[in-house]
Image (tube, helix red, strand yellow):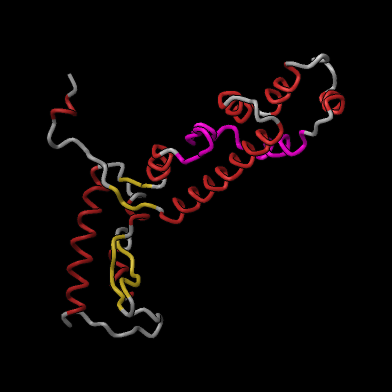
Amino acid sequence: MNLLKNNPTAFKPLLLWKDERQVRDKLAERNLDLIKIKTAIEAIKEFDNSFTGKEIISCLVTGRNYFEGLIRKDSNFPKADIQTLLKLQGRNADKAFSALQDVKRNRIEEFEIKDNTVTIKPETIESINKICSYYTRSQKQNDAAKYSIELSDLINKGIENGFISAENTPSNSFPNQHLVRPFNLILKYKKLSIGKLGLQPDPEEIIRLK
């Protein structure tokens, strides 16, 4: 019997923030991988257009050794040095070898390869977003996250309505910086919009709470 499942007060992680820059960087990496995969496929087909789609994918996954095996398969000298064999055949595979070397084989499964198209799988994008998302790890962090939202809203409204001083302090170019000090475990002071400063929950501090 799963007691947590039937317990309405069971801890449920809350999303604190998603690192959008990290998401963009990882997607940029995958797009670069995609280009390298396409380049390798084109180079293999340019070398020998008779290879099947399955054989080409095996080349991408396994690398140069499998590709060499395909070259040797129907030759009269299957155990010959690969460069010697290619010279005997009057062919050059340097472009394909180089392209295959650039492919990150451990990431092939993150892509959908079909016919002449290569795309990033939706589940790959979903996984990247999940990896770059940070959640609360305890009920205390949940409470802190909810409280920080209520508290920052309350103080920001007080500043906006003139109930809390918005004067600059001599030691800091940010007004109301002194307001953060008592709450620096859950709040931070930052630009909320153009020309507007205020308090905001600090997820990086909240996730450190034990």
* Front residue (pair 22, 196): 22
Horizontal side, residue 69 vs residue 112: left or right: right
Horizontal side, residue 10 vs residue 15: left or right: left
Image coordinates of residue 151 in percent, x first then y, are: 20, 64
Image coordinates of residue 78 in percent, x first then y, are: 79, 15
**Above or below: residue 176 compared with residue 150:** below
- The quadrant in which residue 92 appears is top right
- The quadrant in which residue 174 appears is bottom left
Q: Quadrant of the N terminus?
A: top left
Q: Residue at x 82, y 27 (%)?
A: 86
* Front residue (pair 189, 89): 89
Q: Residue at x 50, y 31 (%)?
A: 109
Image coordinates of residue 165 in percent, x first then y, are: 23, 82
* Front residue (pair 110, 197): 110
**Above or below: residue 37 compared with residue 2:** below
- The quadrant in which residue 96 appears is top right
> Which residues are drawn in magenta?
93-120
Horizontal side, residue 2 vs residue 188: left or right: left
Q: Residue at x 33, y 84 (%)?
A: 168
* Front residue (pair 84, 106): 84
Q: Quadrant of the C terminus?
A: top left
Horizontal side, residue 127 vs residue 77: left or right: left
Q: Report the label total.
A: 0
Image coordinates of residue 204 in percent, x first then y, are: 37, 55
Residue 140 covered by magenta stretch: no
**Above or below: residue 19 compared with residue 164:** above
Q: Residue at x 32, y 68 (%)?
A: 181
**Above or below: residue 51 compared with residue 187:** above
